[in-house]
Amino acid sequence: MEKTNKKEDDVKDIGTQKEVVSKLIESSALTKDFYLMMILSSIIVCLGLLLNNMVIVIGGMLVTPFLSPLLMLSLACVLSDFKIIKRSLFVILKSAGVIVATSFVATLLVPRADVDSSLIYRLVDINLSYFYVSLAAGFAAGYVWARPKLSSVLPGVAISVALLPPLVSFAISLTFFDMSLVVGTIRSFAMNMMGIILSATFVFALLGFYRVKGHVQKEIKQEDGINNN
């Protein structure tokens, strides 16, 4: 009886994981909606940084879909599937390009007299402790995605991850011609991204997502087929 219950629980868990990865694949696909939300969130965060308004920055962080591709990369690492890893990296690079280009243009349109860059410089003033924050944020992001019943806390996770501000700050720093700021923003973004991917990969591995590899491959093939049509 105990073996039967354990098997039923296992099957139920795999079913939930299939739903989770299907949603993750869909949310990380390069669709028109994905691009639109990426552009809008970049503009919001960019304006918030330029106006030294953290509330506006947080608003932009809440609507960005940039977390999904990173979690997809973490899942791909757990599955040890090079094609999915390559696909995820492509989505991340393309998303980053959209963010940087959008933020660069938005910065040029804002009158320099209205700019207060103090918040930007504070964001890139980082140390090793911030890496620990990114590890915790990545763990939270992976766990919340894996447990749909916790979806109500996703907005909080989106804020804690803080992926967008460093990347937007990079675009802004290019218009300032400040190389020290450019280096600082790259370091900040790389640290955040690395911490998130590492800890999310650990979560997905711990929860046994490697068992749905076949389902993930099938879903991605279908999703890519739809987007190419």
Image (cartoon, rainbow, N blue to C red):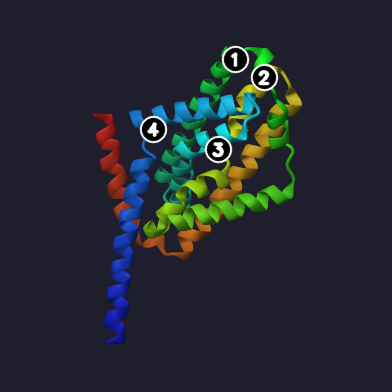
Q: Name the residue under label 4.
A: 34
Q: Quadrant of the N terminus?
A: bottom left
Image: 107 above or below 196: above
Q: Mark 2 points at which residue?
A: 115
Tell me the mark number nearer the camera, choosing from 1 and 4.
1
Q: Mark 3 points at which residue?
A: 58
Could you tell me the amino acid type at mark 2? Val
Q: Earlier in the sequence, mark 4 or mark 2?
A: 4
Could you tell me the amino acid type at mark 1? Val
Tell me, yes or no, if residue 80 can be seen here: no
Residue 48 drawn at (x, y percent): 59, 28
Kindly report the distance in space between the C-alpha atoms of the residues bearing marks 1 and 4: 25 Å
The answer to whether mark 4 and mark 2 are in CB contact below 8 A is no
Q: How crowded is mark 2: few (under 14 residues within 10 Å), some or many (20 or more)?
A: some
Q: Mark 1 points at which residue?
A: 110
Q: Looking at the picture, tell me which residue is in the foreground, 97 or 105.
A: 105
Q: Which of marks 1 and 4 is nearer the N terminus?
A: 4
Helix, strand or loop for disc 3:
helix
Q: In which quarter of the image is the C terminus?
A: top left
Q: Which residue is drawn at 32% across and 44% down?
A: 220
Helix, strand or loop for disc 1:
loop
- Is residue 14 rendered to the left or right of residue 81? left
Image: 19 above or below 93: below
Helix, strand or loop for disc 2:
loop
